[in-house]
Image: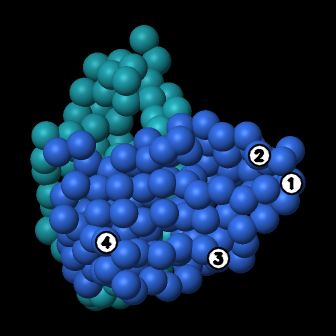
Chain colours: A blue, B cyan
Amino acid sequence: NAGVTQTPKFQVLKTGQSMTLQCAQDMNHEYMSWYRQDPGMGLRLIHYSVGAGITDQGEVPNGYNVSRSTTEDFPLRLLSAAPSQTSVYFCASSRFWQRASDTQYFGPGTRLTVL
Amino acid sequence: DAKTTQPPSMDCAEGRAANLPCNHSTISGNEYVYWYRQIHSQGPQYIIHGLKNNETNEMASLIITEDRKSSTLILPHATLRDTAVYYCIVRAEYGNKLVFGAGTILRVKS
């Protein structure tokens, strides 16, 4: 298994541009989520999904959209990039969404800079 | 989710055991204690988790006090590659939300 993969690894945008961060997992996991991590801080939850067709907001959802058309993919869209969205973005997945005993696996991250 | 308190940083000599404490005094009976670590801006890596009993795997041991208000992650023989930020997270029984605090920066020194 490749696990959780993210593309691109690095991205530079100008203010106002839009783009999509890709996340995929090949473990048939129900639950997928997006986090952002600002310098020197812990991760904050942006959006999550408990299965195909079902998404919900996390702690910091403003400025981001998600969709889950397949079990494998969970793209994160920045609608109109702002410098405040400069961050490292991590995607995570776990097998089931209900069980706290289930572990989450994280991707390698996408480093985004908005100028 | 219960809040956790960790020391901001710790040092450990290479080859010695690293003991990382975590306080979670408001934990409820059905909440799990999880430990993750993050090595130099990589994605967080799962280490271990537990509910009541002490747990051990190939990476570490988790000691949870009887009242469950605190726990200790033990890396038995720390190496330079264990230098990372370690996060203690208390997680509700239902739902997958992980709430990350600032964590503990562990520096393993030769």
The residue singled out by tag 1 in the image is: A15
Going by the numbered disc 2, the residue's amino acid type is Leu
Circle number at residue A61:
3
Q: Position of residue B78 (x, y in %)?
A: 31, 27
If the image is split into quadrants, where does the C terminus of chain B sit?
A: top left
Q: Position of residue B109 (x, y in %)?
A: 46, 18
Mark 4 or 3, nearer chain start = 3
Q: As rendered, which of B49 and A24 lies closer to the eye?
A: A24
Going by the numbered disc 4, the residue's amino acid type is Thr
Disc 4: host chain:
A
Q: Is residue B19 left or right of residue B6?
A: left
Distance between mark 4 and mark 1 Cα atoms = 30 Å
The residue singled out by tag 4 in the image is: A70
Disc 1 is placed on an element classified as loop
Image vertical order of residue B44 relative to residue B26, above or below: above
Q: Which residue appears at 61% of the width and 65% of the height?
A: A77
Disc 3: host chain:
A
Going by the numbered disc 1, the residue's amino acid type is Thr
Disc 2 is placed on an element classified as strand
Q: Position of residue B4 (x, y in %)?
A: 50, 68
Mark 1 or 3, nearer chain start = 1
Q: Which residue appears at 25% of the width and 27% of the height?
A: B77
Question: Residue extending furthest top?
Answer: B110
The residue singled out by tag 2 in the image is: A13
Q: Which residue appears at 79% of the width and 56% of the height?
A: A17
Distance between mark 4 and mark 3 Cα atoms = 21 Å
Asked if marks 4 and 2 touch (Cβ < 8 Å), the reply is no
Asked if marks 1 and 2 touch (Cβ < 8 Å), the reply is yes
Disc 2: host chain:
A
Circle number at residue A28:
none
